[in-house]
């Protein structure tokens, strides 16, 4: 089973976050839905939720902040 999350994040951090997330083998994929708005979609196995949450929390050290995009 997989989880899909739509998030809004700092647009200047999208490339960096994508590279970090996808560097972890089989953890998650990031798709940019609207680069200007900073809207991204993350798809990851449900059992990788803790790893993804940890990566996202670590991104705060680099000034990258996330918020849920909702059902846009």
Image (spheres, rainbow, N blue to C red):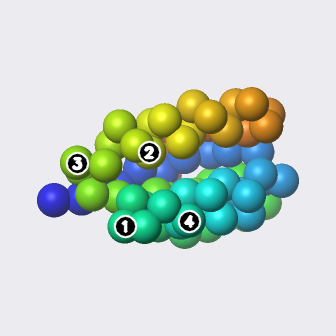
Left or right relative to 71: residue 19: right
Q: Which mark is residue 52?
A: 2
- Label 2 element class: helix
Asked if residue 40 can be seen in this view, the reply is: yes
Quickly name the residue at label 4.
Answer: 23
Residue at 39% x, 59% y is: 27
Q: Which mark is residue 47?
A: 3
Q: Earlier in the sequence, mark 4 or mark 2?
A: 4
Label 2, label 1: how far apart the Cα atoms are? 11 Å
Quickly name the residue at label 1.
Answer: 26
Asked if residue 33 can be seen in this view, the reply is: no
Mark 4 or mark 2, which is nearer to you? 4
Label 3, label 4: how far apart the Cα atoms are? 17 Å
- Label 3 element class: helix
Circle 2 packing at 10 Å, graded few (<14), some (14-19), many (20+), is many
- Label 1 element class: loop
Residue at 44% x, 45% y is: 52
Mark 3 or mark 4, which is nearer to you? 4
Residue at 67% x, 38% y is: 59
Figure check: 59 above or below 27: above
Figure check: 57 above or below 21: above
Q: Nearer the viewer, residue 36 or 58?
A: 58
Circle 1 packing at 10 Å, graded few (<14), some (14-19), many (20+), is few
**Quarter assignment of residue 50:** top left
Q: Earlier in the sequence, mark 3 or mark 2?
A: 3
- The picture places residue 6, in percent across and down from the top left corner, at 48, 51
Residue at 40% x, 43% y is: 51
């Amino acid at each position: 089973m997989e989880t899909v999350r739509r998030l809004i994040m700092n647009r200047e951090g999208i490339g960096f976050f994508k590279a970090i997330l996808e560097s972890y083998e089989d953890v998650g994929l990031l798709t940019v839905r609207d680069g200007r708005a900073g809207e991204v979609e993350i798809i990851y196995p449900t059992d990788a939720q803790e790893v993804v949450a940890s990566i996202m929390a670590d991104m705060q050290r680099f000034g990258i902040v996330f918020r849920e995009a909702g059902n846009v």
